[in-house]
Image (cartoon, rainbow, N blue to C red):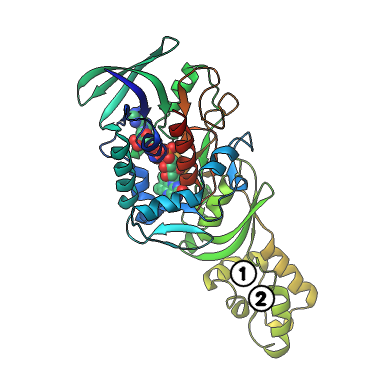
Amino acid sequence: MNVTTLILGAGAAGMMCAAHAGPDTLVVDHAKAPGEKIRISGGGRCNFTNLHTAPANFLGQNPHFHKSALSRYTQWDFIDLVARHSITWHEKTLGQLFCDGKSPQIIQMLRDEMTTAGADLWLQTNVGEISHDGTHFTVTLDREGTRHCVTARNLVLATGGKSIPAMGATGLAYDIARQFGHAVTDTRPALVPLTFSDQRFAPISGVAAPARVTANDTSFTEAVLFTHRGLSGPAILQASSYWHEGEAITLDLDPNASLYDTLRTQRQTEGRRALTTELARHLPARLVDHLAPALALTGNLADQSDARLSQITDALRQWQLKPTGSEGYRTAEVTLGGIATDRISSKTMQSRDVPGLYMIGEAVDVTGWLGGYNFQWAWSSGWAAGTAL
Ligand code: FDA
């Protein structure tokens, strides 16, 4: 069987690419349904883009690589597409756009666009051997027990990263890229909860507090969630992309830097109030109880000198913690790193070395922050390849 373009992976990037590729396109996926990560994303409502998408919201060894695709297919283009399909949405927080309805609306939209473009979709299809004769790729496919040999001028790698293997994530794109001489950077789980070997936060599991979390000089101010195994919540997930094993992170539990002045003011009028009672008006009470022994939070407000209040607020603002690890690919939202971008055209996503080989989406060494940025990369890179095919 011959096609012009064979796309491996019917996830966000693969479907977007197929929607813009020519009619003679086949998309294959080993899963039972396309876009499974879209379906479960955003708590079932798909955080499909971010109003504030900008190059600074992405990590990768080349900080410029993602700029071209993101500037040519922007968040506004995707919002237009969503509007054309009558999908309504709302901004939850920090520019994050979610469907008013459910994530399958986005999957259906992409399927409809693929149908309009004339692309074919094969599910439950396993990818076997791949060869290239200089102009065409020959790929062995096993579709529900039947072997097919497909020849294509273009081969698009869109099988994503390694996060959540239980959902079918594999390193297939990395293996194929290596087969054709492309390097793959070190990869690690990102947007992932951090863990401690001693379960120190088990007693306050479920407590959440706003904080500024800093890892490797990059800070995020959002909620932190204490869990049985360690730390989670958006601020921690964001920081996890910048954290390396063996390093400490810093929690600032007073991100507005107002606590010292507040405690001094309260000391004048509420001097007989216990220090822990006052602190529990600004931080979760269970967290204050947890911190009380280590910070020696005893006595009334009137007992505390300015120096002591300063010492306490400094400790709350510079809480250094050294996680022992992360929850790993089992729960990570994305894979940091991937196919090195140095031998890929940032305009078309085509290999500079193997004509007709394209690499898009999470498989590539471009990783977005939490908040719709990773889908925007999938849309932008998928569009860049699709319109170049
Ligand atoms: P994606 O993983 O979507 O697709 C890859 C496809 O390839 C899959 O269909 C898979 O079955 C297939 N495949 C893999 N190996 C294969 C093989 N060997 N053979 C055949 N097929 C194979 N991002 C965001 O911006 N907003 C959000 O709300 C969320 N929420 C979210 C929640 C959860 C729980 C996760 C795990 C992730 C998110 N993300 C997210 C991240 C987002 O889902 C991710 O970045 C994109 O789906 C990446 O799109 P891709 O198309 O590159 O890979």
The residue where tag 1 is placed is 292
Which residue is depicted at the point 55% across and 32% down? Answer: 347
Q: In this view, does 274 lie to the left or right of 30?
A: right
Quadrant where the N terminus lies?
Answer: top left
Q: Quadrant of residue 154?
A: top left
**Taking the image as four quarters, which one is ligand 1 found in?**
top left
Residue 338, given in percent of the width and then of the height, sits at: 52, 31
- For marks 1 and 2 on the same chain, the one whose residue lies earlier in the sequence: 1
CB at disc 1 and ligand 1 closer than 8 Å: no
Most foreground residue, 369 or 206: 369
* Disc 2 packing (10 Å; few <14; some 14–19; many ≥20): few
Q: What element carries label 1?
A: helix
Q: Can residue 331 be seen in this view?
A: no
- Going 46% across and 55% down the picture, which residue do you hit? 228
Q: Which mark is residue 298?
A: 2
Let me know if residue 72 appears in the view: yes
